[in-house]
Image (cartoon, helix red, strand yellow):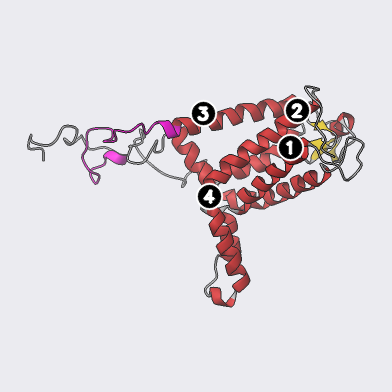
Amino acid sequence: MATGTEPPGTQPRPSGGGVHSPARAAIAAPHLRTDRWWLAPAATAAGLFAFVVYSTWRAFANADYYAAPYVSPFYSPCLAQNCRTMHAGPNADLFGSWWAISPAIIILIFPLGFRLTCYYYRKAYYRGFWASPPACAVAEPHKKYTGETRFPLILQNVHRYFFYAAILVAGVLTYDTVLSFRDQHYRWGHMGLGTLVFLVNIALIWTYTISCHSCRHIVGGQLKHFSKHPVRYRAWRFVGRLNAHHMLLAWLSLASVALADFYVYLVASGVFDDPRFF
């Protein structure tokens, strides 16, 4: 009941759904924060949007994704016949000449599916694009909240399965990194600037992947007595320490995979030659 002496912005609002339900505090103001709370969700939305634009362009380009001995992480492993016509590098030709779509369309669904359902990225794009909520102590504009209990957001629960696919993708990218220790004539014992780019990328890809909450559960979940499983306990502690940096690793690995692809694009398109150290 309002008495007329309440501070400005705290008078009761008409009852409604969501954050304005009768069970919630009756605060008329959208929020009481005085800092620039909108900077974080805006920066998140801008960063994710930039990656979506770039990856979409590169996925549909269907060109300049191989420069011996480097193959773009967006296109690896290359599973279409047109990869064989593009280069003599490694590919599995599982799809014949009928497959006219860019090979990256086949590959990117797995790492992007893993990131799209990742617990951190869900928080990031829920806040950045859907404003659910836009920031701590800032009410979301939606009248009701159902979380991830209904279609399509209930599909986020497939994250644990995309984790297994992400492990396979990381394994393939590790193989590509090993192959980067060759020269353009496929002779071993050489190293170029692209090799360093690939090394940094695969290190970030692996640390981001195994710092996932699903990995932490697989390693140490459902154990009643850690003392009886010392190896799994140490692995769980290690993954837990990485998990504390999951957000940072998510952004760094997102940037590194785009950088690795862009580097291959620059070399393949003839912008410059890959500097070889030895």
Q: Which residue is mark 1?
A: 106
**Lower sequence index among marks 2 and 1:** 1
**Lower sequence index among marks 4 and 3:** 3
**Lower sequence index among marks 4 and 2:** 4
Q: Residue 209 in the image: x percent, y percent?
A: 63, 50
Q: Which residue is mark 4?
A: 245
Q: Which mark is residue 46?
A: 3
- Element carrying mark 4: loop
Q: Residue at x 83, y 31 (%)?
A: 67
Of tags 1 and 3, the one toward the viewer is 3
The CA span between labels 1 and 3 is 26 Å
Disc 2 marks a residue whose amino acid type is: Tyr
The answer to whether residue 264 is left or right of residue 137 is right
Camera-side residue of 118 and 227: 227
Of tags 4 and 1, the one toward the viewer is 4
Q: Quadrant of residue 220?
A: bottom right
Q: Quadrant of the C terminus?
A: top right
The question of residue 19 being in magenta is answered with yes
**Lower sequence index among marks 3 and 2:** 3
Badge 1: how crowded within 10 Å, few (<14), some, or many (20+)? some
Camera-side residue of 60 and 178: 178
